[in-house]
Amino acid sequence: MSVQGIIIATAIVGGVGLFIGVFLSIFGNIFKVETDERELAVEAALPGNNCGGCGFPGCSGLAAAIVKGEAPVNACPVGGAAVAAEVAKIMGVEADASQKMVAFVKCHGTCEQTTERYAYDGVKDCRMAAFVPSGGPKSCEYGCTGYGSCVSVCQFDAIRIVDGIAQVDKEKCTSCGKCIAICPKNLIELIPYDAKFAVACSSKDKGPDVMKKCKTGCIGCSLCAKNCPKEAVEVSDFLAHIDQEKCVGCSLCAQKCPKKIIEKL
């Protein structure tokens, strides 16, 4: 190729590149989406875990929702009061006091308290075990299978498997909700950090059936509800549940429980 041809080819390529650059610049300005500076500031103030515990797609999604008024400034469960205060400062509002919540596993069916119906050789994952007979090999189909799906999704090392059931370290828990979402048996719920007692059982079987499967399961006898001076305990579907807003921590429910399934936290 001659020198003249090379120069012409170079000029053509350069001209096309310049045209494309100008074209993209013009259309970029036309379709430019303005970002509120507060949104960037709020996102920077958030922890950056992108856990989804707030109900939005990551910290950027929450930041956008806060700026639009679609989420409160204290919506981040990981950041807590400190982050809420910082976000409130950016937004120029007051941060409402939020109650710290932690995850609680509603099961005491350890290896000693329950038995196994059969030998399970499948994938050691709670979600997979949910598809086998009785939701896993343990005698109680409502209980924790102990394969740790909740452990695998916890970013904060707040859950571990002890003696066949999941246990939550309340000091590490940020109430992000991932363990709740992944548990196929809905065994995990959020309770106040300062809760005094909770029922560590999820069985809805009648008393005689429960006793055949678990030595410590709730039998729905209602002694806890009958002895609660604040009417904070209710029994439905043969299972006791404590209303944490009414509970004063007197411990009468735990004292009267014949199966000792009401756990002191």
Image (cartoon, grey):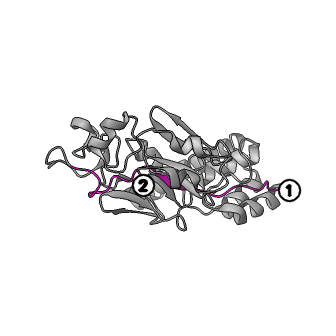
Determine crowd level at label 1: few under 14, some 14-19, many 20+ residues with C-alpha closer than 10 A.
Answer: few
* Residue 89 rendering spot, x and y as whole percentages: 82, 61
* Residue 190 rendering spot, x and y as whole percentages: 55, 50
Image position of 86 (left or right of 24): right
Q: Camera-side residue: 234 or 49?
A: 234
Q: Is residue 98 magenta?
A: yes
Q: Nearer the viewer, mark 1 or mark 2?
A: 1
As displayed, is residue 178 above or below residue 208? Answer: below
Secondary element under disc 1, as helix, strand or loop, is loop
Residue at 51% across / 43% down in the picture? Answer: 223
Image position of 243 (left or right of 217): right
- Three-letter code, disc 1: Gly
Q: Mark yes or no: residue 83 visible.
A: yes
- Three-letter code, disc 2: Gly
Mark 1 and mark 2 lie on one chain; the one further toward the N terminus is 2
Q: Camera-side residue: 142 or 123?
A: 142
Residue occupied by mark 1: 92
Residue at 63% across / 57% down in the picture? Answer: 249
Secondary element under disc 2, as helix, strand or loop, is helix
**Main SS, magenta residues:** loop
The quadrant of the rendering that contains the N terminus is bottom left
Q: Is residue 243 magenta?
A: no
The quadrant of the rendering that contains the C terminus is bottom right
Determine crowd level at label 2: few under 14, some 14-19, many 20+ residues with C-alpha closer than 10 A.
Answer: few
Q: Which residues are magenta?
A: 95-115
Q: Which mark is residue 5?
A: 2
Q: Camera-side residue: 14 or 63?
A: 63
Q: Mark yes or no: residue 1 visible.
A: no
Image position of 124 (left or right of 99): left
